[in-house]
Amino acid sequence: MGPIPVDRIISISSEDHAHKAENILNVSDSHQTWRCKSGEKQATVILQFLKPSVISSIDVGNDNSAFVEIFVGKSTSDEFQVLLVTSSLMTLHECKNGLNVNKVRFFDTDHLSLASKESWDRVKIVCTQPYIKQSKYGLSFVTFHSKDIPQKEPIQSQSIQLGSFTLRNDDESDDISSAGRLFSKRNENKDVVRMPESPVNRLLAIHKKNLETGKHKNANSTNINIQTPLMNQVNSKSPKDSVKPKNIDLNVKKNNTITMTAVKNTEVKKKESSPSSSLLQPSRKKIKLMKNPLPATKPFSELLNNVVFVMSGYENPYRSNIRSKALEMGAKYKHNWDLSCTHLICAFINTPKYHECKRQGTYRIVKSDWIDKCHSNRCRFPWRRYALDKWEQNKPESEDEICAHTDSVETDDSDDEWNSVSAKPIPSTSQSNSSENRQNTITTSLYDLDTDIDSDLDIPKDILADESIVPLPFIDDIFRDCSFYLSSSLKPLLKQECHRYIIALEGKFSEKDKCDYIVSTDTNDLQFKNSVTPQWIWDCYDARKILPLI
Amino acid sequence: MSKRKAPSDSTNPNHDFCEFLIELADYEKHVVRNKYKGNAYQKAASALAKYGKRINSGEEAQKLDGIGAKISKKIDEFLETGTLKKLDNIRVDDAAVSIKDLTRVSGIGPAKAKELYDSGVTNIDILLKNQDKLNHHQILGLKYLNDFEEKIPRNEVVEVEQIIKKTLHNLDPKYKVTICGSYRRGKEFCGDIDTLISHPSFMSHGLKKKSDKLQVVVDILKKNNLITETISLGEAKFMGVCKVNCISRRLDIRLNPYDQFYCAVLYFTGSDLFNKQMREHAIKQGFTLNEYTLRPMGSTGIPGEPVEINSEEDIFDYIDYPYKKPEERNI
């Protein structure tokens, strides 16, 4: 039973400028909701499916609506039939007291009318809220499920033939795409108490997993360990998994073709990772000494030293839980937002503090996950990963991870670190920027980060051996054959970052008058036709292609 | 609902008008079988009863809700002559008289009465000799004709209520018991005893399985010597006869699904006209209300899923109708 892919929104009765209708298709973030304009009698949205489907169940996430009614129709006619009769999303009591405005209801076949036996490619959703006058209401999400086995969905788990290898996607039961995922897995094994997750969160997480187009599927066949798509992939090998030393890692693009780089990576990897872990170890040591003179570690109690935070939208006891975790890591708490504050830990957008924060131009608005994950992983993750605003999440991270000192050997920390490294590959600086060495660049950059916490020598050998199978982050070579000049007007940090990106994306550097692109923020430079801003680089990196110059 | 309505209050200054209007209402309902005309007369009678002052002219009466040109003319005629031509005609009409007489029997309605009249049964005495024409209910109705015509004083209903409540609570404290009808509306006299019971284990979505709860309840009340006769007994409704003093009374017990209990209580508390008004209001508010559920109407007029009701007040709240206590529902 898979979710029915929605092609587009055909029409809406109205939408609030902050709560656009497309938000209902976004299952992953329950704070992004669709609401109508204030004072509407009913709020309607019509969706178009990719193809006609039989709807067997519907999940509806509410946002302040009292009732929802769902119709089905066909693109060939304007008529709609009732699929789900008007059903309550909130009781009167809840409406009047503003309680449980985001309930989720699951409607299965028993709730649906006879129309559920046919296939339809259009649905009309009608929400009403007669009890709160002038309110803006709508839904946070809606998902339609079909019993049909999806045939051409991007998320299907089909096997892919790759030469003589067969790629088989292996759904991990409850993958959650967060940096601490592997870590929490380990916790399960060790019976460590975790923050309980509500069923709704789990549901949302599963939906997210389903909907994110195959972002991270682990391929796992008996002899070959092949990691499937995308850069955000996460290796979920636990140290206990015994993997044969000859395992090969492949990075596979979204379109399921092996890229050249990935294959090269594999070769390099093969060369470098000799079967014996004792040989591997010294070489890693060396890399560390050479290339990572500044191990980013701090005592756990100082991890968030320079963070002054304000909280908004969280209720006790969760609020105090988060607050004490942050304080434990050395952050400072303030009741109200002032100029000394650095981060807003915010449950949803549009809270008064959120607006205040925005007005003052601060953009470090994060979800409580950030504190949770940093605390449980003993590692300060870049805040952007947990940004409340979607568009912030997509920007490149400007800070590195900082790990807590470990007193005793925590072997699993290495996994965790691997996890976070591979979860968001950051193109890293390397002395070797010649094209012959580019594979090495990628490989060693990974080792760079790895060795930060792997400095202890008494790590069990089998774990080190396992690490040789960790996938390499896949980075496009979009700047290949391009040469860059970094303007002296760039600030050192920015310049360094640009440098890292350009190398990672296989670009070269040359003189100002010979280069293809001048990277600058200076207005004088911007008059050159070929001048670009650092932002253009980040954008290219995100888009995975060279974007046209503006 | 019942034809054994409590008499109109004789302290009411418009008592005589009410009486003739109710007589006309009964005639329209039972003989002509035009319930709309019947309802119109009944509504006019209620309006006059509520007015509180003696009406001195048809014109004055016409200002009241429910009294139009024709009824105001009848009031004028009654004021002038002390009688009503239409009523006099009815009173001498054989068929009307017979049907009125026969419908006194519980279980005999206008249709059955008309059938009996056509077959030559024109009064109760003839009926007593022709009991083969009657069903079980009608035979019992005839047997207890005089008892059932006696109005039930309030304190006797209280007595019955206590017996039923005590019995059911001994059986299972989770039982809910409410006696509805005019008793709940605070009247001093009632026509019958309308009891609603419910139990949390009995829900509307489990209705497919048979429930023997009502059977068990009735059996126990029979052992207690409260219930003396059974007119009919199904899964959800018992009709029968009970007796606490010397007079036999009509007793109905309905077992309602727990989630529909309050809609049933509202409905069976009445009054008929109050229910009608409330339903009209519900429709204006985009709901449909019946004795089982309150459902929102969809945008294409299809009733939706029943809303959750946890008290009578909830129903009023949902349709945004000012709450009326049972005593305020005597329209």
Image (tube, coloured by chain):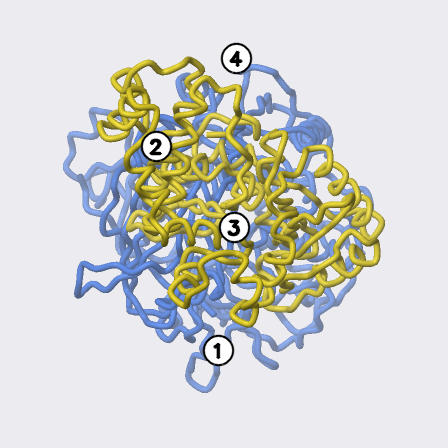
Chain colours: A blue, B yellow
Marks 1,4: beta carbons within 8 A: no
Comparing labels 1 and 4, the label whose residue is closer to the camera: 4
Q: Is residue A332 above or below residue A433?
A: above
The foreground one among B56 and A214 is B56
Mark pair 3, 4: CA separation: 84 Å
Disc 1 residue type (three-letter): Leu
Q: Which mark is residue B104?
A: 3
Badge 4 is on which residue?
A338
Q: Are marks 2 and 1 on the same chain?
A: yes
Q: Is residue A116 above or below residue B265?
A: below
Mark 3: give few (<14), some (14-19) or many (20+) Cα within 10 Å: many
Badge 2 is on which residue?
A18
Disc 4 residue type (three-letter): Asp
Mark 2: give few (<14), some (14-19) or many (20+) Cα within 10 Å: few
Q: Are marks 3 and 4 on the same chain?
A: no
Q: Is residue A226 above or below residue A6?
A: below
